[in-house]
Image (cartoon, helix red, strand yellow):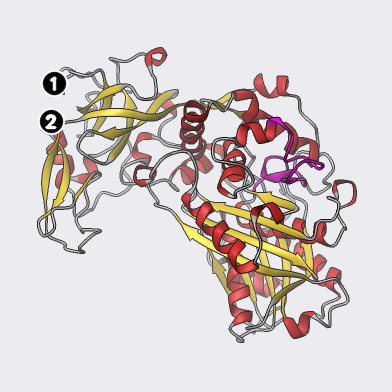
């Protein structure tokens, strides 16, 4: 089901495939090693600290802070139709980072490094097949409210 | 263990080379290197090819290059670490000679990029980011460096003008390099008026895709000492990595791999940053050169913008950087770039660089980055 993740998905098969299913249901999940407790976002099946392959999912709040961002004008193959689009890298409140598009609740002129953001699970509603992703929104935005598209 | 010397250098024309195949480009550089070093091709005991295979229709590139160079049955192999593939080739040649397995090797960086369209190249290069968690949002190579630029500007007050002053300098020196893709000076005003690519970058912040090749002939100490040319020695060889994913970096202000690789190279060569008289650094984007000043210790962290503004990286400044035009002006045939850097430093150390010659350049440095710093190779080169 990891093939659901992303407008263009490059790696449909992974040991953390269930991540995309959780995201479809509105949950942002990282991983926790069942042996040493080490947590990771993005999730990973194999612990970088103790090498164990025994992990469980743990839910992240999606509360985040902006590290950096850029508006992409020259888009790669598969993304020309959504350009220009703005991506941001955020520090997640619990630990780890993610990279995502900014959603509709934030205009380009409002974007500032260090601003508080909410990561919101989303579904591409204009596409027939299931396609899930997440976007960066104003704090307090919930997943069911978010519209589709970058 | 033997010292490894460079006894021959060759450099082809960089640019859109619709006139030649990749092995024909490799041949140009190889022939020039043999002629430069007065090396008999029969004495070459192997080759290393630095290139990124995804850009070529030809699969398994070393085979076709080795045949065209008429080097069969001697061994060859490919090194690939994105834009640092050329320096990886030099490193493995250096390792092969140090180990005693080889004595005289041809190292060739070669790349034909323009068989693909720009969006195809953007897509390929964007996938030098982590494809599982990042590329799905349409990341591009300029976008990754733009994230670093934004962060650097925010943290240290680096300005838009300081970034573009790197491009102005590199075009100025590129105008003096007959092998460069762009041999034309630019103004800050022209750069500021160019098309947006990935905020804050505009076209003039970015190096151009190009075709091209460069070659160095590496020799063991005993072979090198019989050379008719002044020998330039690979005395400091640093090489390090950082996380593939930008999400697992400590910050977006520099490249940890470049810091580590340069520290190791300085230590091996017994030099300090201030001993470097001329440097070639990986200016794939303007911010990359500014971060290189800092990562290599040419200036303090955060002062890279001021370093270019004060013209400290021009000839006559503290450490002249990219006085052959850099990637920005030469073009960036990704597999050839690292070897091209070494060729330029050899020219400088031999005092053969013509109107872009740096005075008293006895010690030089190359800094070749793969991807967004996933790989970094630093060489310290010395002339006897």
Element at label 2 = loop
Residue B100 seen by the camera: yes
Quadrant of the rendered structure where residue B171 is?
top right
On the same chain: label 1 and label 2? Answer: yes
Mark positioned earlier in the residue sequence (1 or 2): 2
Residue A97 image point, x, y percent: 29, 39
Label number found at residue A144: 1
Q: Distance between the Cα atoms at labels 1 and 2?
A: 8 Å
Side of B27 where A5 appears, left or right: left
Q: Chain of mark 1?
A: A
Q: Which mark is residue A26?
A: 2
Label 2 marks which chain's residue?
A
Picture coordinates of residue B249, whole percent (x, y): 38, 45
Q: Secondary structure at mark 1?
A: loop
Q: Picture quarter containing residue B101?
A: bottom right
> Which quarter of the figure has residue A71?
top left
Provide the residue span drawn in magenta: B309-332
**B73 within the magenta span:** no
Residue B330: in magenta span: yes
- Whether residue B54 is visible, yes or no, is no
């Amino acid at each position: 089901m990891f093939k659901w993740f992303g407008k263009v998905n490059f790696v449909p098969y992974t040991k953390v495939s269930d991540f995309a299913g959780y995201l479809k249901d509105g949950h942002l999940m990282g991983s926790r090693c069942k042996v040493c407790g080490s947590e990771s976002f993005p999730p990973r099946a194999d612990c970088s600290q103790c090498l164990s392959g025994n992990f469980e999912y743990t839910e992240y709040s999606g509360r985040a802070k902006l590290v950096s961002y850029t508006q992409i004008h020259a888009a790669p193959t598969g993304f020309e139709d959504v350009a220009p689009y703005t991506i941001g890298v955020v520090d997640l409140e619990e630990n780890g980072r993610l990279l995502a598009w900014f959603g509709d609740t934030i205009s380009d002129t409002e974007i500032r490094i260090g601003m508080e953001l909410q990561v919101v699970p989303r579904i591409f509603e204009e596409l027939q097949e299931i396609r899930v992703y997440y976007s960066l929104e104003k704090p307090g935005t919930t997943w069911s409210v978010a519209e589709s598209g970058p | 263990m033997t010292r490894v010397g460079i006894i021959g250098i060759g450099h082809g024309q960089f640019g859109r080379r619709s006139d030649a195949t990749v092995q024909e480009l490799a041949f140009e550089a190889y022939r020039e290197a043999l002629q430069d070093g007065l090396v008999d091709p029969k004495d070459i005991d192997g080759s290393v090819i630095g290139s990124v295979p995804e850009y070529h229709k030809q699969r398994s590139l070393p085979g076709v290059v080795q045949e065209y160079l008429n080097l069969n049955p001697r061994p060859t192999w490919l090194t690939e670490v994105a834009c640092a593939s050329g320096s990886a080739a030099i490193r493995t040649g250096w390792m092969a000679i140090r180990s005693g397995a080889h004595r005289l090797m041809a190292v060739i960086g070669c790349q034909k990029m323009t068989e693909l369209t720009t969006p195809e190249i953007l897509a390929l290069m964007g996938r030098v980011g982590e494809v599982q968690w990042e590329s799905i949002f349409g990341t591009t190579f300029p976008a990754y460096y733009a994230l670093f630029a934004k962060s650097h500007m925010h943290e240290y007050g680096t300005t838009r003008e300081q970034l573009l002053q790197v491009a102005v300098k590199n075009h100025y020196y590129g105008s003096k390099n007959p092998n460069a893709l762009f041999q034309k000076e630019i103004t800050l005003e022209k750069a500021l008026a160019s098309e947006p690519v990935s905020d804050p970058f505009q076209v003039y912040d970015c190096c151009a895709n190009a075709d091209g090749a460069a070659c160095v002939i590496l020799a063991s100490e005993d072979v090198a000492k019989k050379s008719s040319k002044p020998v330039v020695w690979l005395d400091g060889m640093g090489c390090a990595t950082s996380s593939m994913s930008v999400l697992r970096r400590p910050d977006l202000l520099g490249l940890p791999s470049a810091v580590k690789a340069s520290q190791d190279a300085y230590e091996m060569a017994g030099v300090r940053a201030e001993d470097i008289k001329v440097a070639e650094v990986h200016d794939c984007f303007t911010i990359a050169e500014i971060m290189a000043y800092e990562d290599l210790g040419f200036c303090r962290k955060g002062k890279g913008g001021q370093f270019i503004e004060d013209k400290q990286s021009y000839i006559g400044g503290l450490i002249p950087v990219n006085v052959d035009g850099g990637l920005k002006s030469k073009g960036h045939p990704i597999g050839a770039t690292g070897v091209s850097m070494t060729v330029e430093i050899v020219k400088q150390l031999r005092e053969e660089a013509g109107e872009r010659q740096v005075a008293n350049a006895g010690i030089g440095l190359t800094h070749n980055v793969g991807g967004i710093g996933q790989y970094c190779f630093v060489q310290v080169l010395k002339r006897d």
